[in-house]
Amino acid sequence: MALNVVFLGPPGSGKGTQAERLAGSRGLWHVSTGAILRACVRDGFGPDGTAGNPELVRQTAAILKAGQLVPDDLMMVLIREALAAVPAGSSGWLLDGFPRTAPQAEGLISLLAELGSDEPVVLEIFVPNEEIVRRLSGRLTCSTCGHVTAAGLAVEGDPCRVCDGHLAMREDDRPETVRNRLAVFREKTRPAKDVLAARYRFERIDGLGSPNDVTQRIASVLAAAG
Ligand code: AMP
């Protein structure tokens, strides 16, 4: 049976880092909707994969910049294509950044039933708000590979230690946008969690402590899940 995982957690919970690690260690196909959307904007595609619609690309760029959400109908097209691209015979997939609204969660449940996918385990990384704001102000992201470096460990422009890119502050990690992203998370993404938790196996992971502590907790929960 495939190991399919839906990762939930507010911005700054360490979700992206843990998703990267888990996908790497278990050979899972990593679907980060934020990374896909940033690539769409960079390469001039709409979230639905269409080229030749500069207005849609501009709107998407503005939504990302403001920390708002891309409309659900476009996200459903994106996730359907992302899941269709999972290589046959892979050990499973991991969704990072999707779903973010209750309609997306309901759409995902129908899509997985339609595709006959193995039921995912839903992991929520929980971190208190004050800690999130502290972590996000100053984190740096490689503009080439997306690797994240914690605040205080590097400065903008430093080389990435994973690839030959350079570190920069993500446009949407600036304080005003961070507040927006957290508000959006509270209003829209919590209900998505309730929809999934009512349907699939749900585990809440304590996101405090070092990244290695959290990785360990996730491994234990998955080992217990069998
Ligand atoms: P992330 O890298 O997951 O923090 O996502 C960056 C941004 O991409 C978010 O702030 C949203 O603007 C957009 N985004 C990512 N995933 C979704 C989604 N499932 N639904 C709507 N917008 C999304």
Image: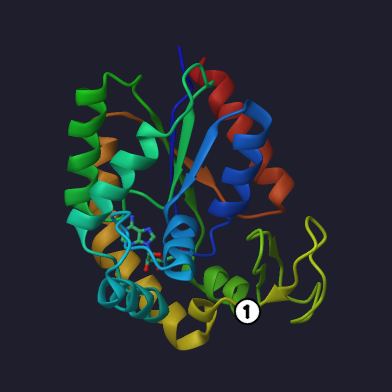
- The kind of residue on which mark 1 rests is Met
Image coords of residue 95 (percent x, y): 43, 42
Q: Which residue is mark 1?
A: 169
Which residue is rendered at x = 37% and y = 35% of the image? 83
**Display coloring:** rainbow
The residue closer to the viewer here, 36 or 109, is: 36
Which residue is rendered at x = 50% and y = 58% of the image? 35
Query: What is the residue that sits farthest to the front in this orientation?
Result: 52
Query: What is the residue that sits farthest to the top in this orientation?
Result: 1
From the viewer's perspective, is 170 left or right of 153?
left
From the viewer's perspective, is 124 left or right of 198?
right
Image coords of residue 49 (percent x, y): 33, 54
Is 14 located above or below residue 52 in the figure?
Answer: above
In what quadrant does ligand 1 lie? bottom left
Image quadrant in which you'd find residue 143:
bottom right
Image coords of residue 91 (percent x, y): 54, 20
Image quadrant in which you'd find residue 57:
bottom left
Image coords of residue 150 (percent x, y): 71, 68
Quick one: SS at disc 1? loop
From the viewer's perspective, is 153 left or right of 137?
right
